[in-house]
Image (tube, grey):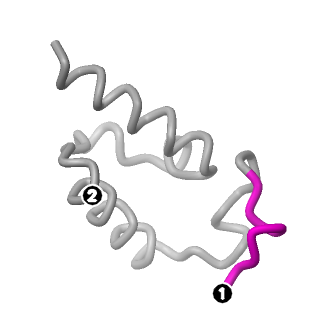
């Protein structure tokens, strides 16, 4: 596991050992938890590289649902 001290908002989570299989599990879990659907174009290294990037993407998706 990773301690909270190691995981800052802007830390590259792939450098902490996240691999592609776990990244897909994370994506599916986020979609379920937040009741959102990521477009294929949104599933990118840049969007899921950091906690802050993931948070921003989730916020955008939730705003889209409000329209």
Locate residue 56 relative to residue 40 in the image: left or right: right
Magenta stretch: dominant secondary structure? loop
Q: Quadrant of the C terminus?
A: top left
Q: Quadrant of the N terminus?
A: bottom right
Q: Kindly check if marks 1 and 2 are in contact, taking CB atoms under 8 A apart as contact.
A: no
The crowding category of the residue bearing disc 1, from other C-alpha atoms within 10 Å (few below 14, some 14 to 19, many at least 20), is few
Q: Residue furthest right?
A: 5
Q: Quadrant of residue 53?
A: top right
Residue 49 position (above or below residue 38): below
Task: Identify the mark nearer the N-term, 1 or 2.
Answer: 1
Q: Residue furthest bottom?
A: 1
- Residue 34 percent coordinates (x, y): 27, 49
- Residue 30 percent coordinates (x, y): 33, 57
Q: Quadrant of residue 4?
A: bottom right
- Residue 14 percent coordinates (x, y): 64, 66
| Tag 2 secondary structure | helix
* Residue at mark 1 to residue at mark 2: CA–CA distance: 21 Å
Give me the disc on residue 1: 1
Locate residue 15 relative to residue 46 in the image: left or right: right
The crowding category of the residue bearing disc 2, from other C-alpha atoms within 10 Å (few below 14, some 14 to 19, many at least 20), is few
The stretch drawn in magenta includes residue 6: yes
The stretch drawn in magenta includes residue 4: yes
Residue range of the region highlighted in magenta in the rendering: 1-8
Residue 35 position (above or below residue 33): above
**Nearer the camera: disc 1 or disc 2:** 2
Q: Residue at x 29, y 30 (%)?
A: 62
Locate residue 31 relative to residue 6 in the image: left or right: left
| Tag 1 secondary structure | loop
- The residue indicated by pointer 2 is 33
């Amino acid at each position: 596991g990773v301690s909270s001290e190691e995981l800052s908002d802007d830390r590259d989570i792939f450098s902490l050992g996240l691999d592609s299989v776990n990244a897909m599990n994370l994506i599916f879990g986020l979609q379920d938890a937040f009741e959102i659907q990521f477009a294929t174009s949104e599933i990118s290294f840049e969007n899921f590289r950091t906690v802050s990037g993931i948070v921003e993407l989730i916020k955008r998706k939730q705003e889209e649902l409000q329209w």
